[in-house]
């Protein structure tokens, strides 16, 4: 059973989350939106910090039990054995920041699924 303090904290976080969403979706600058709604910008930024902290706490932990490591096998290059010189054209190319992931058409569904799960947890 939740105690009064926990209920109050959750109520405030929900209210602050709505305020942050409303401000961000308004298209206004934070200072203009706060002025229009009689909110001190310092209070807004405090609420924003609290909402972000709560969101980070709610994320699943990155322990090895919850997120298995996905093995990636790279073919051993045998340069010069093919007229194409082992150049393989990828059917799917995913760019994630500075990382580029290339998937060929013959990749297994299991490998693709595990790779996408791993990418989902990278932030």
Image: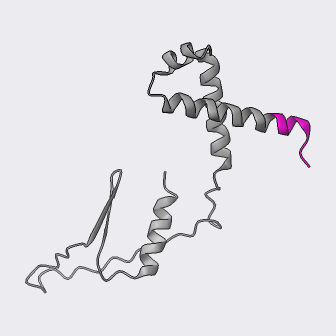
Q: In this view, does 83 lie above or below 33?
A: below
Q: Where is residue 64 in the image (x, y as percent from the top left)?
A: 62, 65
Nearer to me, 38 or 83: 38
Nearer to me, 71 or 107: 107
Give the mark count.
0
40 displayed left or right of 79: right
Q: Can residue 71 be seen in this view?
A: no
Name the chief secondary structure element in magenta: helix
Q: In this view, does 95 lie above or below 40?
A: below
Q: Does the magenta stretch include residue 122?
A: no
Please name the residue shown 64% across and 24% down the image.
46
Return the residue found at the far bottom: 81
The colour scheme used to paint the residues is: one colour
87 displayed left or right of 20: left
Please name the residue shown 20% across and 73% down the image.
89
Q: Where is residue 24 in the image (x, y as percent from the top left)?
A: 50, 31
Q: In which quarter of the image is residue 81?
A: bottom left
Q: Is residue 41 visible?
A: yes
What's the magenta region? 1-8
Q: Position of residue 102 (x, y in %)?
A: 30, 68
Q: Where is residue 83 in the image (x, y as percent from the top left)?
A: 7, 84
Please name the residue shown 49% across and 55% down the image.
122
112 displayed left or right of 100: right
Q: Quadrant of residue 95?
A: bottom left
Please name the residue shown 61% across and 17% down the image.
42
Q: In this view, does 28 lie above or below 1?
A: above
Q: Is residue 70 above or below residue 60?
A: below
């Amino acid at each position: 059973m939740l105690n009064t303090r926990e209920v109050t904290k959750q109520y405030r976080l929900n209210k602050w989350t709505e305020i942050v969403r409303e401000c961000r979706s308004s298209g206004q600058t934070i200072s203009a939106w706060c002025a229009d709604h009689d909110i001190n910008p310092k209070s807004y930024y405090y609420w924003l910090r609290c909402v972000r902290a709560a969101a980070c706490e709610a994320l699943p932990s990155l322990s090895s039990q919850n997120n298995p490591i996905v093995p990636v096998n790279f073919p051993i290059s045998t340069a010069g054995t093919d007229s194409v010189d082992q150049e393989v054209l990828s059917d799917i190319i995913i760019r994630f920041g500075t990382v580029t992931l290339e998937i060929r058409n013959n990749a297994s569904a299991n490998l693709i699924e595990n790779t996408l799960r791993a990418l989902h947890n990278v932030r």
